[in-house]
Amino acid sequence: DTAVSQTPKYLVTQMGNDKSIKCEQNLGHDTMYWYKQDSKKFLKIMFSYNNKELIINETVPNRFSPKSPDKAHLNLHINSLELGDSAVYFCASSQTSGYNEQFFGPGTRLTVL
Amino acid sequence: SQQGEEDPQALSIQEGENATMNCSYKTSINNLQWYRQNSGRGLVHLILIRSNEREKHSGRLRVTLDTSKKSSSLLITASRAADTASYFCATAPLANDYKLSFGAGTTVTVRA
């Protein structure tokens, strides 16, 4: 009974390609997030959706586009991948607001060659 | 910009010893949270302490919060090998409660 799941777990691709990462939560939460964790383990928020509406959009290249088809899903599409996009991407969810605990997915390790 | 900063960056202790790590932050907060990340895994929420609380316990975890100094500490008592992980503090500013900001983490190694 995985609470927050992400696919794929590993993604290896060439520079310039377009790729997507999918996230699903079965916790009934109304807020979902995408984070990027770099090689030094620094975790930075990228986007957040509340009830399918974008509420946080950090300084992220517009090559990154999140899509939330419903409250339980938040996907991340990346165009024209660059070497610097290599990182671990985490999806998370929480209920109502960020004051409550966030539940994280297992992460997607993206490697751009 | 990074809100929380943990100290030390790394900690190595013997099983059974206590581990203490600190977190400092910059802006006023509603609450502060601690998370654990095992190698190759996602983050797991450990404990949340609200700005009007000074100390909170959960099992072998003890968290303190000093809002006047904008700092928090996490104490793990009687450590076990399974406590080996990275520990992160996270804060949400008053102005935007959705925007959880994480520190760089403290890597704890518990030696058997």
Image (cartoon, coloured by chain):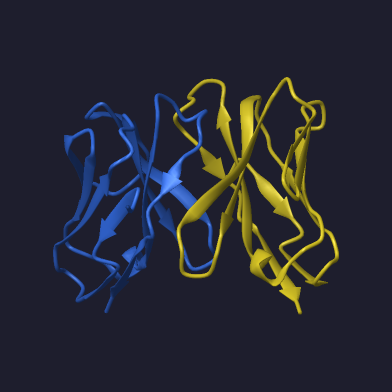
Chain colours: A blue, B yellow
- Determine whether, in the image, residue B27 is placed left or right of residue A81: right
Q: Quadrant of the C terminus of chain B?
A: bottom right
Residue B1 seen in this snapshot: no
Residue A75 seen in this snapshot: yes
Give the x, y percent position of residue B2. Answer: 58, 45
Residue at horizontal 33 percent and vertical 53 percent from the top:
A2
Q: Quarter of the image holding residue B84?
A: bottom right
Residue at horizontal 21 percent and vertical 42 percent from the top:
A73
Residue at horizontal 61 percent and vertical 55 percent from the top:
B104
Give the x, y percent position of residue A5. Answer: 30, 54
Foreground residue among A87 and A93: A93
Q: Quadrant of the N terminus of chain B?
A: top right
Residue at horizontal 76 percent and vertical 33 percent from the top:
B70
- Determine whether, in the image, residue A59 is placed left or right of residue B49: left
Foreground residue among A12 and B19: B19
- Determine whether, in the image, residue A22 is placed left or right of residue B29: left
Give the x, y percent position of residue B65. Answer: 77, 33
- The image shows residue B92, relative to residue B18, as above or below, that is above
> Number of marks in the image?
0
- The image shows residue A32, relative to residue B79, as above or below, that is above
Q: Quarter of the image holding residue A113?
A: bottom left
Give the x, y percent position of residue A13. Answer: 21, 75
